[in-house]
Image (spheres, rainbow, N blue to C red):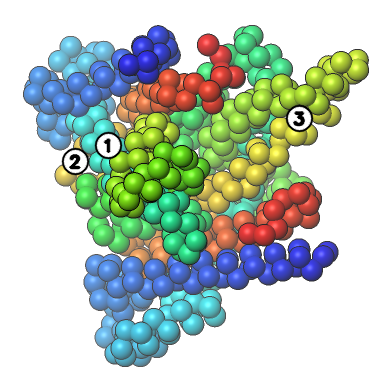
């Protein structure tokens, strides 16, 4: 890697850290705006906490100190992954989030690749059959999925595939009460994953399908494609080797940028399917009015987005050297 | 006038407009024309649709009229969608305009600020804001506005960047017009069409966001909304699937009509850009 590339990556790291710092400060002020005393909020649940414990927390978080000092303590605690504790589970917030993290990574990762794959496939088919019936079907389907609320689609999918057809499980991540191991466990999780991942990815499938279609049609009108056709290349080879390769770049760039938004959608999908990830944890925090846990999940999910954007940036800059390094 | 002509000739956009118009009429006058409260228990619970002519769409888990809920829900959906989009435009347009017009460190500062909001997962931010400030129409509208303004700022900035070097802007500068005047009277009117298109799509996504928030139980407890109806019917989906099905269809149709109208506007206002679309 060149010095320029390393500088670029370094710059991105600094930027990501700055964004997280701003979010941490934002969280600090939000905790103070939550209903109730900040110590009680940090203790997890407003109301029923004993006075000695609250006093300890006040000292630990320096709530008797001036505001800027409190902010300093809050941010430096956060940097050491100390986000206080949850009242219900009596566990450090950070540990609870990390416990739920693998489920969310599995769900969002599966949804991301599924939507990218299906979206590009649908877009390519629609562009190849431009203005014929497959194009119309895919365009209309994309429009409809684009307009449907995610949580409602998830509920309807559960109703149809799980309650009516009884094909797929719609609750949790593993079959309750069966201690499966090895491949059986993996296939059990895989079965539970199908509905949540495909409904979470459906909106983005629609987005990518529309983008791929437009991008393919635009690219196929460029001169180098005409040249390829004119020299007698097979149409299918022109599509895959010339058009698709060039049309994909904007789609993949957009996909990388939007991947973070999958975390937001995961709150809804995990709630509907009782998927034990951080989205479901956020819903539980809402339900229990545990503002500290809520903000903890918010901070960690933002950190995940920052990290993901950083990874995509680095991959791009390695894969496609044309991408501007200056910014 | 060309725009209106090309819009009225676009069948798909007109279908979108027709459906949207219907929802607006329902939202405005429905509560006066249809006699019934969305909260009062009127019949036995779980009355299926099309069985009782007084309550065509049946009743929910507590015996409340589903049709009344839909009518009042249209009101809140459209209201939150319109107001939050307006606020988002009021934040995004000035930020984007200043960043694009002045460039340099102003641009750098404002765009870094915008980027932070774009990085944060927007739905999670909306959830946190509504939860902290307690669910109400005001907190929901505000939260949606706060998560939706960044695309406006970016779009307006891009427009201003490309327009500020145009001859008519330079002429206005030489004329001695103030920067404020140039921004408001010269550049902004010329960048309105993409803003209008974006705004129509933003109303659609604001309606989706509002329904998602009320589905999670973050709706205004005083107001019946489509998302709340679906959330309340979630646990009884096996016994009464129609209770969650009907409000969902209402949301999807409203959002779809806005998207169709937005695409039609895009084709009418930016004919060059959309030249490769089907007729």
How many marks can you see?
Answer: 3
One can see residue A217 in this view = yes
Q: Distance between the residues labelled 3 and 1?
A: 39 Å
Q: Residue at x 43, y 33 (%)?
A: B194
Give the structural element (helix, strand or loop) at label 3: helix
Along the line of sight, the residue nearer the viewer: A153 or A227 = A227
Question: Circle 1 is placed at which residue position?
Answer: B82
Q: What element carries label 2?
A: loop
Q: x%, y% of residue B2?
A: 37, 15
Q: Do labels 1 and 2 share a chain?
A: yes
Q: Nearer the viewer, residue A15 or A53?
A: A15
Front residue of B195 and A46: B195
Parent chain of label 3 = A
Q: In this view, does B267 lie above or below B74?
A: above
Residue A266 in the figure: left or right of residue A59: right
Q: Which residue is drawn at 67% across and 25% down?
A: A218
Asked whether residue A281 is in view, the answer is no
Chain bearing tag 1 is B
Q: Name the residue under label 2.
A: B223
Local crowd size for mark 3, using a 10 Å CA cut-off: few (<14), some (14–19), many (≥20): some
Q: Where is residue A292 in the image (x, y as percent from the top left)?
A: 38, 69
Image quadrant of residue A151?
top left
- Which residue sits at x=78%, y=55%? A318
Residue named by callout 3: A244
Query: Contact, CB < 8 Å: mark 2 with mark 3?
Result: no
Q: How far apart in space, not on screen, are marks 1 and 2 (Cα)?
A: 17 Å
Sequence order check: which comes first, mark 1 or mark 2? 1
Point out the image quarter for the N terminus of chain A.
bottom right
**Residue B56 sits above or below residue A244 on the image:** above
Quadrant housing the C terminus of chain A:
bottom right
């Amino acid at each position: 890697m060149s010095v320029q590339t390393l500088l670029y990556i370094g710059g991105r790291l600094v930027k990501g850290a700055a964004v997280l710092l701003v979010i941490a400060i934002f969280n600090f002020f939000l905790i103070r705006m939550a209903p109730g005393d900040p110590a009680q909020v940090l203790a997890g649940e407003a109301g029923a906490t004993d006075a000695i414990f609250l006093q300890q927390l006040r000292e630990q978080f320096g709530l008797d100190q001036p505001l800027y000092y409190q902010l300093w303590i809050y941010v430096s605690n956060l940097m050491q992954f100390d986000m206080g504790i949850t009242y219900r589970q009596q566990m450090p917030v950070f540990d609870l989030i990390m416990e739920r993290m693998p489920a969310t990574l599995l769900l969002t990762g599966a949804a991301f690749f599924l939507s990218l794959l299906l979206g590009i496939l649908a877009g390519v088919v629609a562009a190849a059959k431009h203005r014929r019936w497959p194009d119309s079907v895919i365009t209309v389907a994309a429009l409809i999925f684009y307009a449907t609320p995610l949580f409602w689609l998830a509920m309807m999918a559960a109703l149809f595939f799980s309650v009516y057809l009884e094909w797929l499980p719609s609750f949790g991540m593993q079959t309750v009460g069966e201690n499966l191991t090895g491949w059986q466990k993996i296939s059990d999780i895989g079965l539970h994953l199908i509905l949540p991942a495909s409904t979470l990815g459906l909106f983005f499938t629609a987005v990518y399908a529309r983008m791929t279609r437009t991008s393919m049609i635009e690219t196929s009108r460029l001169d180098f494609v005409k040249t390829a056709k004119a020299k007698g290349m097979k149409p299918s080879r022109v599509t895959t080797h010339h058009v698709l390769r060039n049309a994909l770049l904007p789609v993949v760039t957009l996909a990388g940028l939007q991947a973070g938004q999958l975390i937001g959608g995961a709150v809804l999908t995990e709630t509907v399917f009782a998927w034990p990830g951080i989205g479901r944890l956020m819903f539980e925090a809402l339900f229990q009015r545990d503002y500290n846990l809520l903000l903890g999940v918010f901070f960690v999910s933002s950190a995940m987005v920052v990290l993901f954007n950083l990874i995509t940036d680095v991959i791009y800059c390695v894969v496609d050297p044309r991408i501007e390094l200056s910014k | 006038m060309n725009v209106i002509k090309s819009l009225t000739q676009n069948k798909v956009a007109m279908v979108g407009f027709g459906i949207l118009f219907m929802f607006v009429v329902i939202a405005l006058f429905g509560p006066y024309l249809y006699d019934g409260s969305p909260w009062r228990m009127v019949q036995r619970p779980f009355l299926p649709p099309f069985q009782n002519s007084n309550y065509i769409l049946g009743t929910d888990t507590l015996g409340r009229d589903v049709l009344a809920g839909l009518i009042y829900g249209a009101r809140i959906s459209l209201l939150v969608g319109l107001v939050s989009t307006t606020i988002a435009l009021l934040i995004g347009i000035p930020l984007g305009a200043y960043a694009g017009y002045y460039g340099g460190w102003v641009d750098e500062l404002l765009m870094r600020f915008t980027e932070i909001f774009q990085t944060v997962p927007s739905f999670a931010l909306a959830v946190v804001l509504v939860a902290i400030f307690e669910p109400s129409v005001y907190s929901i509208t505000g939260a949606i506005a706060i998560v939706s303004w960044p695309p406006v700022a970016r779009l307006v900035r891009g427009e201003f960047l490309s327009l500020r070097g145009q001859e008519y802007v330079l002429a206005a500068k030489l004329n001695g017009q103030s920067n404020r005047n140039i921004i408001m009277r010269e550049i902004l009117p010329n960048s309105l069409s993409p803003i209008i298109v974006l705004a129509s799509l933003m109303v659609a996504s604001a309606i989706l966001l509002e329904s998602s928030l009320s589905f999670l139980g973050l709706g205004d407890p005083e107001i019946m909304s489509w998302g709340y109806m679906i959330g309340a019917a979630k646990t009884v989906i096996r016994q009464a699937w129609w209770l969650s099905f009907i409000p969902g269809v209402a949301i999807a149709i409203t959002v779809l009509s806005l998207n169709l109208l937005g695409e039609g506007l895009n084709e009418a206002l930016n004919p060059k850009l959309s030249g490769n679309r089907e007729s």
